[in-house]
Image (cartoon, rainbow, N blue to C red):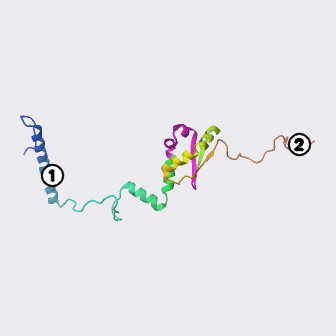
Amino acid sequence: MSDEISTGGGQSAESSAVRGAALAREKLAQAKADAAKRGELPRREPRRRGGQKRPAGDPQLFGQAIRDLLADRGWEEPAAVGGVFGRWAEIVGPDMAAHTTPETFEDGEILVAADSTAWATQVRLLAATLVRRLNEELGDGTVRRVKVRGPNTGPRPGGLRVHGSRGPRDTYG
């Protein structure tokens, strides 16, 4: 038995398509019959829709399993914040991202470090816009305040210093 289909010899494309569809139906019926002989019957119950829960033993979609894990452990917000930190350049733009870095997020306050006082001032001026943009990414009300740290604003190393002293020599003659 030959399964070749030729379109030459005066046949129209339409009759060729009809023969092809008939051949496909015949092959599908043959495959179903072969599966039934092997005991592999097609599924009778309808597939579940997205909103229905799967029984605990059923396999889950990977994305849904991750979302469930994050929700169960209470990691949704930290994961979202980490995503924002990872996509900082996308969110604030390449110019600002080249001069600023998000450092921490605690209690609705994000700390942004700037590499110069000019950029620190720029971020302070754009703080309201930045809060709005971050809340678009994280959910409304997540970020309430942007705190900016300029360059070298941390505590200096070492103890207190006295300027103008001569050290231990000033008590000796």
Residue 67 picture location, percent across and down: 42, 57
Q: Residues within 10 Å of mark 2 (few under 14, many from 20)?
A: few
73 vs 54, left or right, is right
Residue named by callout 1: 28
Q: Earlier in the sequence, mark 2 or mark 1?
A: 1
| Identity, as a three-letter code, of the amino acid under mark 1 | Leu
SS under mark 1: helix
SS under mark 2: helix
Q: Distance between the residues labelled 2 and 1?
A: 104 Å
Tell whether position 80 is magenta.
Answer: no
Quadrant of the snapshot with the C terminus = top right
Looking at the rendered image, the disc whose residue lies closer to the viewer, 2 or 1, is 1
Residue 5 picture location, percent across and down: 10, 40
| Identity, as a three-letter code, of the amino acid under mark 2 | Asp
Residue at 54% in and 40% down:
97
Residue nearest the viewer, comparing 16 with 4: 16
Q: Is residue 156 shown above or below 61?
A: above
Magenta residues, as a range?
Answer: 86-108
9 vs 42, left or right, is left
Residue at 8% in and 34% down:
8
Residue 95 picture location, percent across and down: 54, 37
Residue 64 picture location, percent across and down: 39, 56
Q: Is residue 7 shown above or below 25?
A: above
Residue named by callout 2: 170
